[in-house]
Image (cartoon, rainbow, N blue to C red):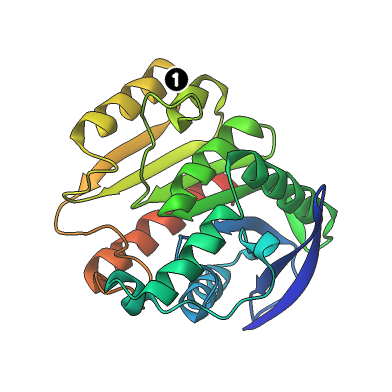
Amino acid sequence: MSHAEIALPTADGEARAFVFTPDQGEGPWPGAVIFMDAPAIRPALFEMGERLAQAGYYVLLPDLFWRAGRYDPPDIAKARAGDPEAQAIFQKLRASTDVERQLIDTRAALEWLERQPQVKGKVGVTGYCMGGGIALRAAGAFPDRIAAAAAFHGGNLATDDPNSPHLLADRIQARVLVAGADEDRTFDAAQKDRLAAALKDAGVDADVSIWKGCRHGWVPTDMPVHNPEGAERHWRELIALFDGALK
């Protein structure tokens, strides 16, 4: 397995991003983008990039906090425990991005993948936590490039906010998989039903559910609520989605 850091050209400057490719063969492979969760770029996300590449994908992991400058992975446990310094780091990183900037970075990621000779066809996107909403917005904003979109323990996917992802349902052409976290106030049963209805009304091939026993943040291995069984289920369903749409 190989991966490399690249400078991703965007309309706002060069973003940091990471590329993961399969061990076997020289491609071309289907392309995939991982949209990070709020705890930022760190080894656990590299594990995920490598795992997806093992399934036969050319994977791009953009650092959506690149505008904040270079940073060390923040201490998740300290921030959750209320440590002021750790929380200040998280606040600085999160303040460096927003919906408009995320779309700029998404466009740059898709255009970069399109230029790579090792990448073929349309792209699959998957997002975690805040990345879940980004993945769905990407599918709505770039329907001609994205064939599959997944969101795991995402929040605020169907709200009254004018930037709510569910409002883009009628533009999505991708197959969609949304798995919400159990007892998550940022994506409760009402939001689940609202998102599912919007996608159904738009004729989108979608599976929207809340996974019982899986808490917000269950997929990455370094999260306190990591659920090994739920994470493996995520891998099975994500790869089945991507394989069905991209291979």
Q: Write down the quadrant of residue 58 in the picture.
A: bottom right
Which residue occupies the foreground of this view, 62 or 205? 62
Residue 90 sits above or below residue 181 on the image: below
Q: Residue at x 69, y 69 (%)?
A: 69
Instruction: Name the quadrant of the N terminus.
Output: bottom right
Is residue 36 in view from this perspective?
no
Q: Residue at x 50, y 81 (%)?
A: 43
- Please, which residue is most extreme toward the top here? 201
Which residue occupies the foreground of this view, 121 or 125? 125
Q: Residue 189 at what x, y percent from top left?
A: 19, 35
What residue does disc 1 label? 203
Is residue 75 in view from this perspective?
yes
Identify which amino acid the numbered label 1 is placed on.
Gly
Q: Residue 152 at what x, y percent from top left?
A: 37, 52
Which residue occupies the foreground of this view, 124 or 226? 226
Residue 69 sits above or below residue 114 on the image: below
Q: Write down the quadrant of residue 96 in the picture.
A: bottom right
Q: Write down the quadrant of residue 198 in the picture.
A: top left
| Residues packed near mark 1 inside 10 Å, few (<14), some (14 to 19) or many (20 plus) | some
Query: Which SS class for mark 1?
Result: loop
Which residue occupies the foreground of this view, 33 or 186? 186
Q: Residue at x 49, y 52 (%)?
A: 131
Q: Residue 234 at what x, y percent from top left?
A: 34, 60
135 displayed left or right of 123: left
Q: Residue at x 50, y 70 (%)?
A: 89
70 displayed left or right of 41: right
